[in-house]
Image: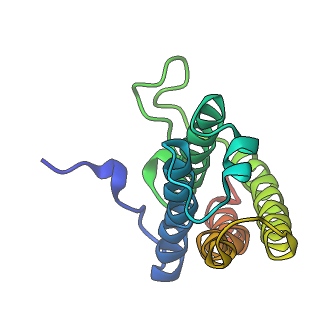
Amino acid sequence: MTSTAFRSVPGVPRWAKWSAHTVALVNIPSGVWRLGLAVGIPFGLAQSEMDAMKTPGWGSLYLVFLAVFSEAVAFLALGLIQPWGETWPRWIPFVGGKTVSARKVVVVSSLGVLATTIYAALFVYTTFNADMAGEPWADWLIAAVYLPLLSWGPLLAVVTWHYHRRRGQVS
């Protein structure tokens, strides 16, 4: 038995499917890097950097939370092309089975576009301009795992635009 929850709705073009799935994947490199730091893998960072992040230790909780939260938020982009982005799944209390407000989705998603674009640009800028002690290749590794985040905002923008165009007549 296959679930319809992971199929895109009719009328979603291939480029929108590709964009939404890519949004859900762009966080994986940085998330894996954060999880590695959380368990104590320094990835070329100096011990002073690890100590400043309090990893391993209490800082690990923040890194794990950030990795999981970022991926969960990115996963929501799939709702812009799949049935659960139009009708709340039945298992959700109080709203299950009801129509999702297209206007609210577009507003929240547009705020996500703004936030992810600013976050990614600032983080990459900071990474390239930071002088982190440690192995010379560590800065390049950090840049490599965070560069995919630069595509998060623009890809989410095109999927949001398509969602708006497809569902714009619905409140």
Residue 79 is situated, as x and y percent measured from the top left of the image, at 52, 52
Q: Nearer the viewer, residue 140 or 146?
A: 140
Residue at horizontal 49 percent and vertical 52 percent from the top: 36
For the point 70% across and 58% down, the residue is 169
- Number of marks present in the image shown: 0
Percent coordinates x, y for residue 101 in the rendering: 67, 42
Horizontal side of 68 relative to 112 (left or right) equals left
Q: Residue at x 60, y 74 (%)?
A: 141
Q: Nearer the viewer, residue 70 or 104?
A: 70
The residue lying at 61 percent from left, 40 percent from top is 55
Residue 16: quadrant of the picture = bottom right
The quadrant where residue 119 appears: bottom right
Q: Give how far across and how far down residue 56 sits, in percent.
A: 57, 37
The answer to whether 161 appears left or right of 2 in the picture is right
Q: In this view, does 148 lie above or below 89?
A: below
Of the pair 82 and 142, the residue shown nearer to us: 142
Asked if residue 80 lies left or right of residue 129, the reply is left
Q: Is residue 17 shown left or right of residue 111? A: left
**Is 130 drawn above or below residue 96 in the view shown?**
below
